Image (cartoon, rainbow, N blue to C red):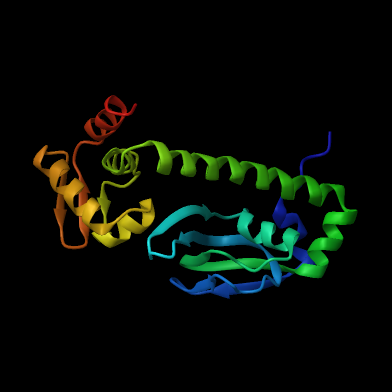
Amino acid sequence: MAQHKTLTDFAADGTMITAPDGACLFRPDDPVSAFLIVVAGTVRVEHSTPAGRTVTLYRVETGDSCVLTTTCLLSARAYSGFGYAEGPVRAIAIPADRFRHLLGTDPAFQEVVFRGFAQRVGELTDVIDTLLVHRTDLRIAHWLGTRSAQDLNMTHEDIAQELGTAREVVSRTLKALERNGWIETARGHVRIIDQAALCHHARAHTV
C-alpha cells in the first residue's frame, strides 16, 4: 500500500522563505500570494476584534499549513488575521496559481490539503466552544494546568492575548490562583506549582 504523502513532499513546487522570531508574516487585508508549508519553527495565528481584544486561534507547526491561508486562497479573499513567527521560521511558499493547479489536478495534493484543513477546523471549533461556554477564570486555570513547562516567561498581557480576554481579568485570576498556592507570579513570569490542582479546579467548576 502506498504511503500517504505529506505537504513537504510538494517542496519542489514552491520556494523556501525565512522569517526571524517575532516577524509578522501576514496581517488583516494583506493579499494572499502563496500557500505556506512550515518546515521549521512555529507560526502563531491570531484574530483581533474591533475593540482591540486578541485571541490566539492556533499554531502552525512543522509540516503543517495555515487554514486561514487555505481559506483565503480558495475564496480569493484577503487575510483577516495575523500570523507571527515564534522563533525563526522556514517555510515553503507555493505560488497561488501553482496551488490552484495542484488542487485541481493532483489527487494526492487534494487529500493532504483537505485532511489538514479538516483537522484545523476541528481545533477552531474547540477554541470557539471554549470562548463561548467556559468562564474565563476556569479557562486560565485549565490553560496553566496543561502547560508542558512549569516556568512561563509571559506577561499578563501575553496570557490575555493567548486566551482572548482582558489583562485585568488575567491579573485578577492569577492573584486568586496564587493565594491558593497553585502558582507564583513575578513581573513577566509565572511559575506553576500544582498543575493537578489547577486542572481539578477547572474541571470541578465547569458546567
Q: Kindly identify the residue that appears in the image at 49 percent across and 67 percent down.
A: 85
Residue lying at the far left in this picture: please name it.
179
Residue lying at the far front in this picture: please name it.
50
One can see residue 153 in this view:
no
Q: Is 178 displayed left or right of 130 in the figure?
A: left
Q: Kindly identify the residue that appears in the image at 44 percent across and 61 percent down.
A: 49
Q: Is 166 displayed left or right of 29 in the figure?
A: left
Q: Position of residue 16 (x, y in %)?
A: 67, 72
Closer to us: 190 or 72: 72
Closer to us: 159 or 172: 172
Q: Quadrant of the N terminus?
A: top right
Q: Kindly identify the residue that appears in the image at 48 percent across and 43 percent down.
A: 128
Q: How many marks?
A: 0
Q: Is 92 displayed left or right of 134 in the figure?
A: right
Q: Position of residue 159 (x, y in %)?
A: 31, 55
Q: Kindly identify the residue that appears in the image at 48 percent across and 67 percent down.
A: 84
- Residue 173 vertical placement versus 19 (above, below): above
Q: Quadrant of the C terminus?
A: top left
One can see residue 106 in this view:
yes
Closer to us: 32 or 4: 32
Could you say which quadrant of the image residue 7 lies in?
A: bottom right
- Residue 162 vertical placement versus 118 (above, below): below
Q: Position of residue 180 (x, y in %)?
A: 11, 37
